[in-house]
Amino acid sequence: MFLLHFRPENVIGQPVSFSLFNWALHSARQFGSKMKIVDVAIAIIHHENRLLICQRRPDGPLAGYWEFPGGKRNENETLQQCLQRELQEELAIVVKPIQSLPCIEHTYSHAHVRLYPFICQLESGEPQPLACADFRWINPVDLPEYQFPPANDDLIPQIITLLTQKGSGESI
């Protein structure tokens, strides 16, 4: 069926993966739905064979869940600008995005979220928990031991595969 093969592109021209449910919601937005759409840039910071993850504060949505640092894009802000601003505000660090991954779309009860993940290198600063409950440097293979928001369900195995490839000839 044609509808199952629909694959729009995100703002940087990469294919966006949709479940049938998310496709239906995407289509509904095209015809006037009022669901809030939130664009979020996230950093997968790989440093000395470890990943940086942050724990959400206990007083907000998805309290206590772990996440990759980043945040909501402001109007008229590029994804890269958003990433730099959010990491400075949340952790007092500067990163260098080295690879973008495909956009991930997920619908929560309160909003439709578009995650834009970037593999990043730590450029400067030591992380400080300015806007998170906690942070940790972990081995990528340990990611499944932490509870992440549902939007990350498909991303986590991709990150583990990408960052633990042996003999690929590429350094990430």
Image (cartoon, helix red, strand yellow):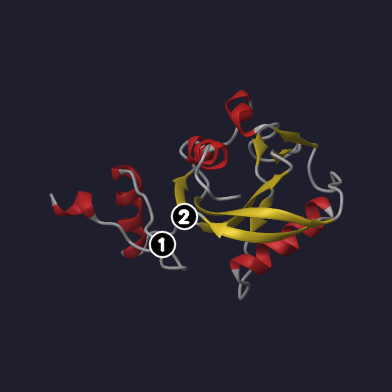
Q: Which label number is shown at residue 14?
A: 1
Secondary structure beneath label 1: loop
Is 172 positioned to the left or the right of 56 in the image? left
Is 43 positioned to the left or the right of 113 in the image? right
Front residue of 131/142: it is 142
Q: Position of residue 132 (x, y in %)?
A: 78, 42
Residue displayed at 44% across by 59% down: 34
Q: Which residue is mark 2?
A: 103
Label 2 or label 1, whichever comes before in sequence order: 1
Front residue of 141/132: it is 141
Front residue of 73/5: it is 5
Front residue of 121/7: it is 121
Residue displayed at 52% across by 42% down: 162
Q: Position of residue 84 (x, y in %)?
A: 72, 63
Crowding around mark 1 (Cα neighbors within 10 Å: few <14, some 14 to 19, many 20+) is some
Q: Is residue 49 above or below residue 70?
A: above
Is 124 positioned to the left or the right of 97 in the image? right
Q: Is residue 67 above or below residue 118?
A: above
User: What amino acid type is highlighted by mark number 1?
Assistant: Gln
User: What amino acid type is highlighted by mark number 2?
Assistant: Cys
